Amino acid sequence: MTDEPTPVIETEGLSVGYGDRVVQRGLDLRIARGEIFVLLGGSGCGKSTVLRTLIGLVPPLAGRVRILGRVFAEAGREPEENPAILRHLGVMFQNGALFGSKTLLENCALPQETLTDRAPEEIERISRDRLRDVGLLDFADFLPKEISGGMQKRAAIARALTLDPDILFLDEPSAGLDPVTSAELDELILRIRAEKGTTIVLVSHELASIFAIADRAVFLDRATHTVLDEGAPAFLRDNSPHKAVRSFFNRTPERKATGHA
C-alpha cells in the first residue's frame, strides 16, 4: 500500500475571519497537485476570506495553512515575508486588480521585479510569453481601461502566471462576463492545467463554469460557518444529503426545497 502524495495545500483546523467575527471554522482541506478545486457557497459565506487566508493576506484565527508541505500561515504567529513560497503562488484577484496606470506588459513585469532577480530583458520576454499564452500579446502596450472586462481578467491571469507558479488562485474569474467570454476563460483555465500541471483554486458561484472545469468543490455554509459538503460538483448536485447544497446546484429556492413555509 502506497502513501497518499503530500497535498500541495493543506489546512488543519483553520478558522478565518476578522477580529472577533468568525466566518468559517474548523476547515480541514487537502488539495492535490494538478487539481481544480472550487470554494463555493452563498453570498457572505466567507469564500473570498478563505482564499485570502490561503494566500497569506488574512491571518488565521485558528489552525494553520501548509503550502507544498511547509507551514505558510498559522494562528498566533505574525505573517512572514516568505518569497521562497510566494514564488510558487500566482493570484488573480476579483475584478483583475490590474494597475490602471501601467500597461499590460508593465503589470506582468511587477511580480517578477518584486519576487525574482531576473534581468530586465528576461522579465520582458517572460511577460510577453504569458500575454501570448492568454491571447493578448497584441495588447501588451494597452492600459487596462483600453480593453474589455474579459481581456482584463485574462491579463490578470497572465500576470499571475509570470512566476510559473505551482498553484494558481482565482477569485471569481467569470463574474460579470457574458456566457461566451466566460466559456473562453474556462477553456483557458483547463489549458493552463493541462499544459503546466498547475493546481488551481478558485472562488466561484458561476454554475456553468463550476461544472465545466472543477474536479472537486467544497460548499461553505453561511449559517453554521462550516463546510457543509465536499465532492465532485455533479455528485453534490445529485446526491448531497444537504438541501442547501442541492438547492445551490439546482438553482432552487432553499425554502421551497426544504418544504418550509
Image (cartoon, rainbow, N blue to C red):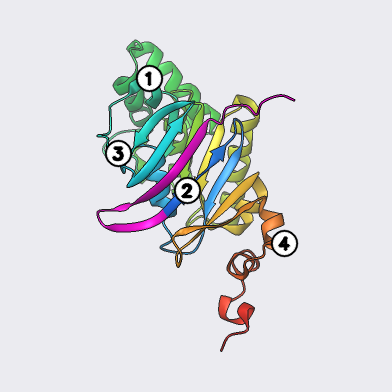
Asked if the residues shown at circle 2 and circle 3 are in contact, with their CB atoms under 8 angstroms apart, the answer is no
Specify whether residue 197 is in view. Answer: yes
Residue at image coords 46%, 32%? 158
Amino acid carrying mark 3 in the image: Phe
| Location of mark 4 (residue) | 239
* Residue 19 is one of the magenta-drawn residues: yes
- Density class for disc 1 (Cα within 10 Å; few <14, some 14-19, many ≥20) is few
N-term-proximal mark, 3 vs 4: 3
Asked if the residues shown at circle 1 and circle 2 are in contact, with their CB atoms under 8 angstroms apart, the answer is no
- The quarter in which the N terminus is drawn is top right
Local SS, label 2:
strand
Q: Closer to the observer: label 1 or label 2?
A: 2
- Density class for disc 2 (Cα within 10 Å; few <14, some 14-19, many ≥20) is many
Q: Which of 153 and 82 is in front in this view?
A: 82
Q: Where is residue 171 shown, x and y percent of the image? A: 45, 47
Q: Residue 99 carries which label?
A: 3
Q: Closer to the observer: label 1 or label 3?
A: 1
N-term-proximal mark, 1 vs 3: 1
Report the side of 100 relative to 139 (left or right): left
Q: Nearer the viewer, residue 218 or 20?
A: 20
| Whole-number angstrom distance, CA of label 2 to CA of label 3 | 33 Å
